[in-house]
Amino acid sequence: MSFRDLRNFTEMMRALGYPRLISMENFRTPNFILVSEMLLWLCRRYEPQTDVPSDVETEQDRVFFIKAVAQFMATKAHIKLNTKKLYQADGYAVKELLKITSVLYNAMKTKGMETTSVSEEESSKFKFDLGSKIADLKAARQLASEITSRGASLYDLLGKEVELRELRTESIARPLEINETEKVMKIAIKDVLEQVQKTKDMLNNVASDEANLEAKIEKRKLELERNQKRLQTLQSVRPAFMDEYEKIEEELQKQYSSYLEKFRNLAYLEQQLDDHHRVEQERFEEAENTLRLMQNRLKEEEKRLLKSGNNDDSDIEIQEDEGSDSEEEDRQLIKQRTAMEILMQGRPNKRIVGTMQGGETEDDESSEDSEIDLDDDEDDDEDDLEDDSMEISPSKANRRARKPEPLEESDNDF
């Protein structure tokens, strides 16, 4: 007896609906009354119409009860019980009782599953699918036809049994003739001798075939040895083209390494060139924006000066102030030079020609045009800007304020 078996038995009996509470301590000592009650309840649970005697007062009644239960379970449920263990009525009887309870418990579980399946079938309006049973149906039909044919043949043979019985008895009762028996035995002996001779011939042929096969095997072995020796000589001999092959392989390795290095350098230089172009483009755009701002500022200042000059009386003479005129011209020159330097940094290959004309004097003196040439090199451009003279001839006499002309842009300008 094990604790697990006892626990499973009590749980199954509780699930089956046994009215009495079963404890694990009930089977520590023999308790035949409890075992008899459970056996009787299980038998009636299996078949309510069973006729099992319930008298267990005397020893003979108990033996008869155990035998009746075992016979009932063997015939009805095909369960083989050990009557000795059941008669002990202790923990060993639990294993025998567990056989019956497990069958009933599994039946109860399958019944619950069938009820659920029946409910599902009812919900599906009693639909039944025979697709999965086609193979079983074909096998059943084949077996039925085979049983019918075998039964018919058996019936025919049994019908001939009367005639065959007479013939069999006649042949048995007939006395044996020695001459016929001797002839039959001689014929049988002759057949056996022929078979023996054939077997001997086959054995002799086997021996000759074995000798031929051994000769062929030896021949193949010799050829194999010769081929192996030839292979070893060919492997030991160095081919004539092997030196050239190794040289070409080394050169190929060098060329491949140089190719990898050049390819890597080329990729790096392309990346650097792309970065340089991007930086130059950014600087160029920045210079364009700066120059545009400077031009807008210069135009605004010119407009402001023009407005201030128009407000002055044309008949009033401007006092000679060479210091103020020169300062105004210097500021304009500084602004223009700054704009030129920015343009030169952004687009060094471009040339900008600008003119600045002052106002006319009373003696109709005209100012000369100023030109600024920009070269490709930035250092040379700065020197040229310093050396170039931007000649502006201010009138020593009084002059009136006049709007200066804007910068003239060349065709290559923005």
Image (tube, rainbow, N blue to C red):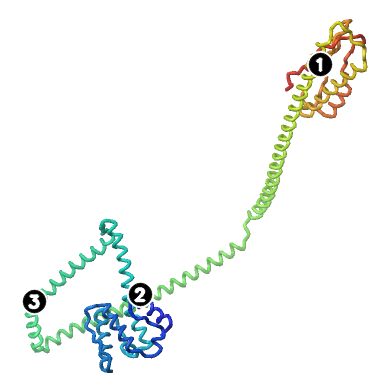
Left or right: 378 in relation to 319: left
Quadrant, the C terminus: top right
Structural crowding at the residue carrying mark 3, measured as other residues with C-alpha within 10 Å and reported as few (<14), some (14–19) or many (≥20) = few
Q: Which residue is mark 1?
A: 305
Above or below residue 227? Residue 246 is: above
Name the residue at 32% across, 80% down. Answer: 100
Verify CB contact (< 8 Å) between mark 2 and mark 3: no
Kindly report the distance in space between the C-alpha atoms of the residues bearing marks 1 and 3. Answer: 148 Å
The answer to which of 135 and 289 lies nearer the viewer is 289
Nearer-N-terminus badge (2/3):
2
- Label 2 crowding class (10 Å Cα cut-off): few <14, some 14-19, many 20+? few
Q: Residue 141, relative to residue 296: is it above or below? A: below
| Residue hosting label 2 | 15
What is the three-letter code of the residue carrying label 3?
A: Gly
Q: Position of residue 267 (x, y in %)?
A: 69, 42
Which element carries disc 3, helix, strand or loop?
helix
